[in-house]
Amino acid sequence: MIERRAHPADSQPSAMHMIDLIRKKRDGLVMTAREIEFLVHGSARGIFPPEQISAWLMAALLRGLTREETHALTIAMRDSGARFDPSHLGKFTVDKHSTGGVGDKTSFLVAPIAAACGLVVPMISGRALGHTGGTLDKLESIPGYRTSLSMPEFERVLAYCGCSIVSQTPDLVPADRVLYDLRDRTGTVESPGLICASILSKKLAAGLNGLVLDVKTGSGAFMRRQQDAEYLAALLVATAEAAGTRTVALLTDMGQPLGRMAGNWIEIVESMQLLRGEQPRGSEDLRELSLILAGWMLFLGGKADSPQAGQLKASAALNDGSAERVFLQMVEAQGGDISVFEKMQSFHRPGARLDVMAWDSGFISKMDTTMLGWAVQRLGAGRVRASEPLDPHAGIEFHAHRGDWVEQGQPIATLYATRPGLFSEPEGLLRSAIRLSNLQPKPVELVSRVWTRTNAEAHLRNALR
């Protein structure tokens, strides 16, 4: 069911001007909720030119947004278009969102797991942003898969198999579509308030009862510093809870790529292997994190008495094949050709490949995951401009991870690209990103902290912002 609401700016005249709002935020002043509604409404309707919106985004990045501004921006963006009401489906609706990472493909596991266990997962996802991959881009590497569904089609897929992963419709959160694109192209991604509003506006517009957030920290995260990631996690939880959605956030490691594949089709392959109950070497962290996230989803949805019990149920859904069946049902219902999963490796047809050998012997002590993400993008798996096509077969397969010992001359990674001429820059980035040492690094916790409403509010009260 689609719910449409009149916007406040439609029913009352306004003497506000965009240039005044730019100056106000530039000067570090706090905007009112009505001013933010005016800005969001005008952005969604195409009233303001991109240069003015970009100027405001830069001011918001440099000056920051208060909690009140962030909440107002989230709600205004949520209400900038139609909203989806899944209540008549008769089941608890829950979703998962990651703040972005390299090789992060947990959505393809947790959505069918949660649906197989009796929940509804209406997942509205995005495309590649900066150095991180896009869920929609990865799904579109499946021939025929449609990420753009009408709301009635979205609803039918949810009723059929319990989960659907789609893009925003033209009517759903149109303001975010404008702001998201400009943030990616103007260097204004790394703002806690803008990230929070972008993520939650889409999730809240989907009518969620529960939400599990995967907030990344480390060298591949938009928020590299632990304290910044903690603030973002707490802000997300508090803002979503204030809007009426039960929410938890997990602080997780992005100090190395998640799993062993980073790209588009090759990430689908790795996900399908885990959905089939396989446990290939190098995918252990991906499997573990997916089960932890799914466990929280099942707990919030009342399908388990604790997150740990939910994790056991999630593992069972992988082992008995029910999660795989749901994933294939979703793909087929959205136009995807599921026959490609019968011979996944033969479908992988990169134009060129290059094995990168270890240049020395030692432990992999550190990985600059952002740099590795840019390497994946330069191979053709990501975009420099919004209109650029992607190579579904480009990417990197990692043969070793942080803490592993490698011998000189041992394959450390395989690069896939459209043509050999694309290898030079990504290979240089990869060699610069991976540090070898005689000392084995200390293990890093995959999940370092869990945020709920109580500790999120306490953290925000004490945060020096």
Image (tube, rainbow, N blue to C red):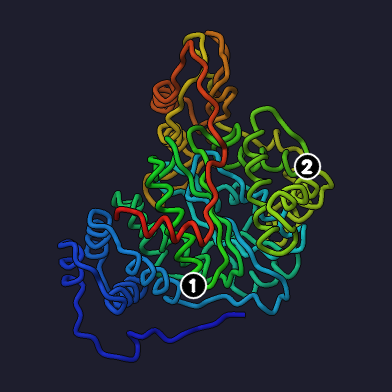
Q: What element does badge 2 sit on? A: loop
Q: Position of residue 43 (x, y in %)?
A: 32, 71
Q: Quadrant of the C terminus?
A: bottom left
Cα–Cα span, label 2 and label 1: 37 Å
Which numbered dot is residue 243?
1
Q: What element does badge 1 sit on? A: loop
Instruction: State the residue lying farthest toward the right.
Output: 320
Q: Which residue sits at x=66%, y=33%? A: 284
> Callout 2, which amino acid?
Arg
Q: Quadrant of residue 93?
A: bottom right
Q: Quadrant of the N terminus?
A: bottom right
Question: Please, is residue 436 above or below residue 214 in the view?
Answer: above
Q: Earlier in the sequence, mark 2 or mark 1?
A: 1
Which numbered dot is residue 276?
2
Q: Position of residue 48 (x, y in %)?
A: 26, 71
Question: Please, is residue 383 above or below residue 6 in the view?
Answer: above
Q: Position of residue 148 (x, y in %)?
A: 56, 63
Q: Quadrant of residue 131?
A: top left
